[in-house]
């Protein structure tokens, strides 16, 4: 599985109401305020659509389904189209279910994908220290419309991934894009909230 695919299999978002507020001019204040908003959200269940553009294919791969997040580390991606597949990450263990086939993987055995997992888990959990352990983090915009750019801090990861861009408003994630150094890219778009 490509690193970008791993991240997108874990990506999800949650929506919660909140009043608009301006970001302080103080450096880092906007990022801190955003992460506090995200950390306050303990559950999310949304629809998604995903497009993967791979150089080896003539046309993009498209999929859709549902995403579930329960703080601090339960991430679930239920792909419904074009074929059913469920991926669940919990307590450092990934379970992949495709039809009758089931596979269980420990992240300890795959340290190269831990930064991808942390990019989404730490963002949703509002965990700045974990984000900055693996990435140089840039915040732009305001809480009403923001973008996080995550650039790999590790040279080995930077050899594969150019950057990860997460965009949203307040505590809602809208899009997540992974751009790889070979030109491949994946974009996940978060849709409507679903009942728990």
Image: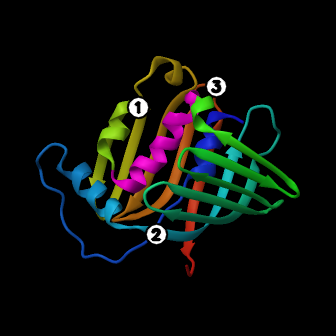
The disc label shown at residue 44, or none: none
Region in magenta: 111-126
Relative side of 131 to 77, left or right: left
Residue 23 occupies which quadrant of the picture? bottom left
Give how far across and how far down residue 99 sits, in percent: 87, 58
Q: How is the image coloured?
A: rainbow
Q: Is residue 118 visible?
A: yes
Query: Mark 3 — residue?
Result: 182
Relative side of 93 to 44, left or right: right
Magenta span contains residue 158: no
- Which residue is the extreme one toward the bottom? 195
Relative side of 109 to 168, left or right: right
Of label 3 and label 2, which has the lower sequence position? 2
Q: How many marks?
A: 3
Q: Is residue 108 above or below residue 193?
A: above
Disc 1 is placed on an element classified as helix
Q: Nearer the viewer, residue 165 or 136?
A: 136
Query: Mark 2 — residue?
Result: 43
Q: Is residue 85 above or below residue 138?
A: below
């Amino acid at each position: 599985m490509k690193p970008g695919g791993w991240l997108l299999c874990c990506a999800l978002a949650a929506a919660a109401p909140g009043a608009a507020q301006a970001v302080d001019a103080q450096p880092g204040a906007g990022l801190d305020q955003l992460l506090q908003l995200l950390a306050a959200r303990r559950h999310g269940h949304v629809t998604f659509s995903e497009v993967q553009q791979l150089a080896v294919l003539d046309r993009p791969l498209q999929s859709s389904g549902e995403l579930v997040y329960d703080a601090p580390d339960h991430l679930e991606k239920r792909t419904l189209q074009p074929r059913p597949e469920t991926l669940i990450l919990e307590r450092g263990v990934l379970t992949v279910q495709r039809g009758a086939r089931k596979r269980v993987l420990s992240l300890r055995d795959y340290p190269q994908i831990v930064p991808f997992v942390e990019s989404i888990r730490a963002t949703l959990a509002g965990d700045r220290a974990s984000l900055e352990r693996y990435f140089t983090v840039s915040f732009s915009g305001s809480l009403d419309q923001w973008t996080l750019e995550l650039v790999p801090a590790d040279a080995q990861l930077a050899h594969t991934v150019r950057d990860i861009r997460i965009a949203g408003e307040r505590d809602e994630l809208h899009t997540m894009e992974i751009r790889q150094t070979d030109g491949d890219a994946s974009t996940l778009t978060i849709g409507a909230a679903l009942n728990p």
